[in-house]
Image (spheres, rainbow, N blue to C red):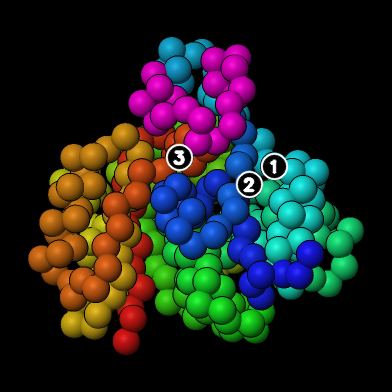
Amino acid sequence: MVPERSVCVVTDSTADIPGHVAEELGITVVPLSLTVGGETFVDGSITMAEFFRRMNASKELPTTSQPSVGAFLEVFESGLARCKDVVCINVSNRLSGTIESAREAARTLGDRVHVLDTLNLSWGEGYQVVAAAKAAAAGESLEGVKRAFEDAHERIHMVVGLDTLENLAKGGRIGRVSAFVGGVLNMKVMFTVGEDGAFVPVARARGGKAALQASVDWLAEHVSPEKRAAFGVLHAESPDKAAWLEDAIRSRFNVAELAVIETGPVIGTHTGTGWGLTGAELD
């Protein structure tokens, strides 16, 4: 079969890319899985409301599993039947072993599969995937798709806030956040993902409103309010916070694009309920 397009784009479900966006841009999403209350689900097959209901009723914290090598291999082989190259863009290697499964699968297929690390997660990852997919959909070559990814990688900034640090602490991913809080787990902590792809605390506040405002203030330090920019408002079962943040972003920044993203259960396993913001200058 002759490839119909130059590059096929693949990612994992932690990118939190809405289904209609993935379909429109031809992005193939390889799902992680999660186990909650003794049952295992494919990411995306259970709503956030149902996930949190099950999590709150369970005595044990849910667990997540990266996709198998075989799952990536199947998707890569399908992509290579349609495209000259496959670009697989994944969650940070510091936060998941997902990219190692992708790399192992790619090694069996030669040099037509290219695995890239966003060093990010959720819409911080998804923004990079979408940028690459838009380039691929426009007919760009492999080099053009990689340039689009690298440009988005350099531009994107993300800050995340959690209602509680309990899930992050139990999951062993709290690291530098714990030291920053100083053991006060009821403190609202905002963090970003650093250049090495690991969580880095950037602000703390007492009270929900102060924490939301601190998140907007942090973003304003990295994205100029005067320049046209693309934004994402993220939430995990927190639509009220998302609405407040959307209003705050629109009133403070030069908004060219704004997406409201509900994170998936795999992300929610490690974060619990919370919110996030992404911003990327376009000019």
Residue 1: x %, y % from top left: 79, 64
Inspect the image, locate mark 3, and give the three-letter code of the amino acid beneath it: Gly
- At x 51% / y 44%, what residue is drawn? 174
Inspect the image, locate mark 1, and give the three-letter code of the amino acid beneath it: Pro
Mark 2 vs 3, N-terminal side: 2
Residue 7: x %, y % from top left: 65, 71
Residue 116: x %, y % from top left: 66, 67
- Asked where in the image residue 108 lies, by quadrant, the reply is bottom right
Q: In this view of the protein, which residue sits in the foreground, 157 or 138?
A: 138
Q: Does 39 appear in magenta?
A: yes
Q: Which contiguous range is marked in magenta?
A: 35-53
Inspect the image, locate mark 2, and give the three-letter code of the amino acid beneath it: Val
Which residue is label 1 attached to? Answer: 67
Q: CA distance from mark 2 to mark 3?
A: 13 Å
Which residue is label 3 attached to? Answer: 264
- At x 36% / y 26%, what residue is drawn? 49
Can residue 60 be seen at all in this image of the molecule? yes
Q: In this view of the protein, which residue sits in the foreground, 80 or 279?
A: 80
Q: CA distance from mark 3 to mark 1?
A: 15 Å
Mark 3 vs 1, N-terminal side: 1
Mark 1 vs 2, N-terminal side: 2
Query: Farthest residue in the front direction?
Result: 1
Q: In this view of the protein, which residue sits in the foreground, 200 or 140?
A: 140
**Taking 30 as reference, is 181 left or right?**
left
Q: Does 241 appear in magenta?
A: no
Q: In this view of the protein, which residue sits in the foreground, 166 or 45?
A: 45
Q: Under tag 2, what secondary structure? A: strand
Which residue is label 2 attached to? Answer: 30
